[in-house]
Amino acid sequence: MRGLMRQLFHALGASGIFVAIDGEIAKSILLKEQVDVVVTDYRMKPISGIELAQWIRQDPASPNPDMPIVMASAFSEADQVVAAKNAGVDGFLLKPLNLKQLEHRLVAVLNAPRLPVSRGATRQEASEPTPVELDIEEFSI
C-alpha cells in the first residue's frame, strides 16, 4: 500500500511525501517534519491507525492535534468506521484505492470546516453526536 499511496500522491501533484512502515515511525516523522495531512492504514503494528489518530488528537507531544487524518482500510464494518470517527479521523477510504477516490476524499477533508480539538478530546466530543447509521462514502466531517 505504501508504494501505491506514494504513486497516487505524486499523480495528484503532491511533493514532500513521507512514508512510514508503522505508527511509531509515523509519530517520529510527525514530530520532525511539517505535515499537511495524514493518511493511515486501519491495521498497523505495533500502533494501529486508530491509536495513531488518538495520539495526534490527544497527546501533548503531538505537534498538530487539528491535522486532517484520513484512514484507509480493506474492512468496512460499521464498528470500525465509528471507531475511526471517534478517534478523530476526518475521512475513510476503502481499499483497493484509486486516484479518483483518494483525490475526492482529500479534497473533501482539506476543504471541510475544521473544529479545533482541545488536547484530550476528539472532534466527536466537540460536534454533533455520531448517527447510529454511518455511510462510509459520506464519512468526512
Image (cartoon, grey):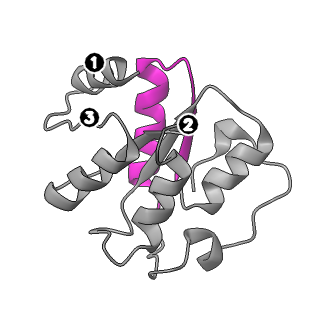
Mark 2 secondary-structure assignment: loop
Q: Residue farthest to the right?
A: 132
Residue at the image position 26 percent from the left and 34 percent from the top: 19
Disc 2 + disc 3, Cβ < 8 Å: no
Q: Secondary structure at mark 3?
A: loop
Identify residue type, mark 1. Gln
Q: Residue at x 31, y 54 (%)?
A: 27
**How far across and down, in percent of the image, does residue 100 sit?**
45, 21
Q: Earlier in the sequence, mark 3 or mark 1?
A: 1
Rounded to the nearest whole Å, what is the CA distance between mark 3 and mark 1?
Answer: 11 Å
Q: Is residue 114 visible?
A: no
The span shown in magenta is: 90-114
Picture quadrant where residue 123 is located: bottom right
Q: Give, as a three-letter code, the residue at label 2.
A: Arg
Q: Residue at x 69, y 45 (%)?
A: 81
Q: Decide if residue 9 is on the left or right side of residue 125.
A: left
Residue on which the image places disc 1:
7
Q: Which quarter shows the N terminus?
A: top left
Q: Residues within 10 Å of mark 1 (few under 14, many from 20)?
A: some
Check residue 105 for magenta coloring.
yes
